[in-house]
Amino acid sequence: MKCPMCNCDNSDTDNFCRYCGANLQYNKTSDDKEKYIEAFIGDQYNNFKNSTFNIGAFFLGPIYLFYRRMVLYGFVYLIICLFVPPVIANIILAFVINGIYLDFVRNKVIYIKNSNKDLDESSLLEKCSKTGKTSLVGPIILGIVMMIPVILFIYLVYAFIEGASYTPSNNSNTHNNTELIYEVPSGFRSINDHYFYSNDNKHYCVINITNSYNSNYGYSEEEYFKNHYLNKEIMTKDIHNKRWYYYFETNSYNHTDYKYMSLYENKLYTIDYRINKDEDGYCSQSMDSFVNSLKFVDKSLSEA
């Protein structure tokens, strides 16, 4: 063993230098601790000891702290960033992180050694190596957490743009589906022959209009209903001198579905109306208004 003061050779069992009297055991104890610290840190040990600026901490900020398993430090850093611009905080972090990390590792090594006094030196070194170094789990979790507000913001912007692209219908707008004419209730938004109304989670109702063409139906609307909806209570309603067949039911989610059907010029017209929420009855009133506006084009008048 060389003396740290005079650089003279001494025996490994000597407690003091034979030439200058310096304490050799202090240096031996210090070297012993550094072995465990180096095992804990890994390949970057010398960089942490000799470098004054940490480029990884500068670019990654809190992610770097989580990467180095300094979870509590990472959360403290995030709180600091609420009051200090992240760029400035990253610059400061890059200059101070190496010293903070070495102190963090020293405390971890002391804890490991005190908690595993029955282990020999090689086992303690392996324990330090497994406990320390780096981890990708923390940065991944942090990245996911940090992406949540970004995704939420994108969703809100998309919802706003989509909502702005619709123009609510009003009572004065008369629409037609080939031969069928109808008035869309006020406040309903439209996509082709699909209409919906939503207001502050108090009301939500949907209208869907379809028609299918077949010149050989061979049966009336009533027969069609009886054949396809055996367990439904079929009712009728005459609207503008045209009979419509319909039924309604409420499912387990407390949604009420109405289905209206009428045959005209070999086309089977179907109206589906669903009410999901209806706190003050607006959706029910709108349904009555919409159904009562249903009217088929009188082709004899148009041909004349």
Image: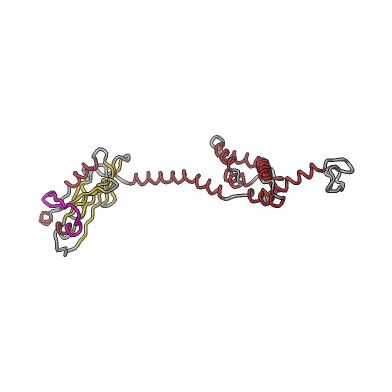
Residue 299 shows up from this direction: yes
Rendered view: 74 above or below 192: above
Q: Which residues are magenta?
A: 224-245
Q: Is residue 221 above or below residue 290?
A: below
Q: Is residue 95 visible?
A: no
Residue 71 at what x, y percent from top left? Answer: 58, 43
Residue 100, position as x, y percentages in the image: 66, 40
Residue at far top of view: 83
The quarter of the image holding the C terminus is bottom left
Q: Residue 165: percent from the left, percent from the top?
A: 34, 46
Horizontal relation, residue 233 to residue 37: left or right: left
> Residue drawn 89% across and 43% down?
19
Residue 133 part of the magenta-drawn span: no
* Residue at x 29%, y 47% (from the top left corner): 253
Judge by depth and name the residue closer to the eye, 9 or 79. 9
Q: Is residue 234 left or right of residue 125?
A: left
